[in-house]
Amino acid sequence: MRFPARPASTGANPAQTPRTTVTKEIAPADQLLTVRDFLRYAVSRFNSAGLAFGHGVSTALDDAAYLVLEGLKLPIDQLEPFLDARLLADERQHLAALIEARVTTRKPTPYLVKRAYVQGVPFYVDERVIVPRSFIGELLYSDVFGGDDFTVIEDLSSIETVLDLCTGSGAIAILAANVFENAEIDAVDLSPEALDVARINVDDHKLADRIELYEGDLFAPLDGKRYDLILTNPPYVDQVAMDELPPEYLHEPAMALGSGLDGLDIVRRILAEAGAHLNLGGGLLCEIGTGREILEAEYPDLDFLWLDTAESEGEVFWLSAESLGAS
């Protein structure tokens, strides 16, 4: 067996010869062991990267908790029991990859985990639809509908037909089916891709026998049908805001966000046509963002009832069928 030749001596003192130390970079998945570790790491990364929030959460901590819990398929509202749970190697690698993707792609967390929640109800989501986050969900589950004191609809069982305009993922239609148990529901969207996602959710919630999906422009595909209740969370972002959207929002379909210079082009169309599609005694519930003053000035004869939620004031209105000219 031959050995390499020994290099000739340089005469240098080995103790004085500088050594090169190679430090191997350790991946986060190899250093972080528990749910608490990944939660802390995610919050630090999110804050350092200056991420924007607003797709169901409003802080780095909430976004990190959502990503970690959903990434591990744990109950989304039960963080505390799992904080000190040690994770398996594949779980650590999966979470590390999700955190890295959230920072580098700026995709909203619901797109990364393919799941969003409204009022605790889960929905499949991907980039074909806007991430569902409407104030209408909270209102549907509040005393505004069927409450003992103030309510716009006293008897939930009296609602037999509901229309969800601009349905997107189908979330509002599905929530309405849960609230109004006697109702048949139509859901309309202009995007065939969004309706593909809505169909996934309708099937997942086993509501195909009660929710009918229509492709088309607002009321156009409905052939003059009338409803006891119309629900709509249409596009309402104004042009200035569209031009300044953080990267997270640019992953959502632009047609689901913008609606003209002041954001109210589609709302105006809905107001013009809704009366012809409402039964007497019914009404329209519509989310519009920050356009209250514009609408009140432009429609002084309409009796807008503004409904607040825990995180909104004057961003959702109710109009009775009679106010909208139904006959």
Image (spheres, rainbow, N blue to C red):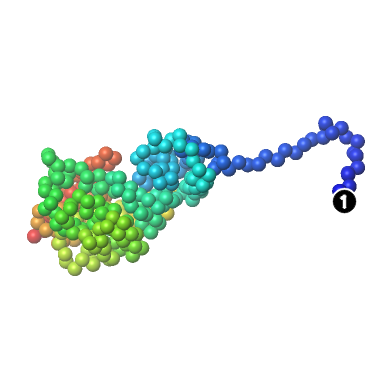
Residue found 23% across the figure and 57% down from its top? 164
Vertical order, 13 against 140 (above or below):
above
The foreground one among 168 and 83 is 83
Left or right of 124? Residue 3 is right
The answer, for residue 219, to whether it is visible in the render is: yes
Vertical order, 112 against 12 (above or below):
below
The foreground one among 220 and 266 is 220
Vertical order, 159 against 49 (above or below):
below
The answer, for residue 237, to whether it is visible in the render is: no
User: How busy is the neighbourhood of tag 1: few (under 14 within 10 Å), some, or many (20 plus)?
Assistant: few
Residue found 91% across the figure and 42% down from its top? 8
**Quarter of the rendering containing residue 147:** top left
* Residue projecting furthest to the front: 1
Residue found 15% across the figure and 62% down from its top? 226
Where does label 1 land, which residue?
A: 2
SS at badge 1:
loop
Left or right of 133? Residue 211 is left
Residue type highlighted by circle 1: Arg
Quadrant placement of the C terminus: bottom left
Residue 111 locus on image (x, y percent): 41, 52
Left or right of 262? Residue 100 is right
**Quarter of the rendering containing residue 222:** bottom left
Residue 71 locus on image (x, y percent): 43, 46
Residue 237 locus on image (x, y percent): 33, 51
Residue found 42% across the figure and 54% down from its top? 251
Residue 322 locus on image (x, y percent): 10, 54
Q: How many discs mark residues in the rendered view? A: 1
* Residue projecting furthest to the top: 15
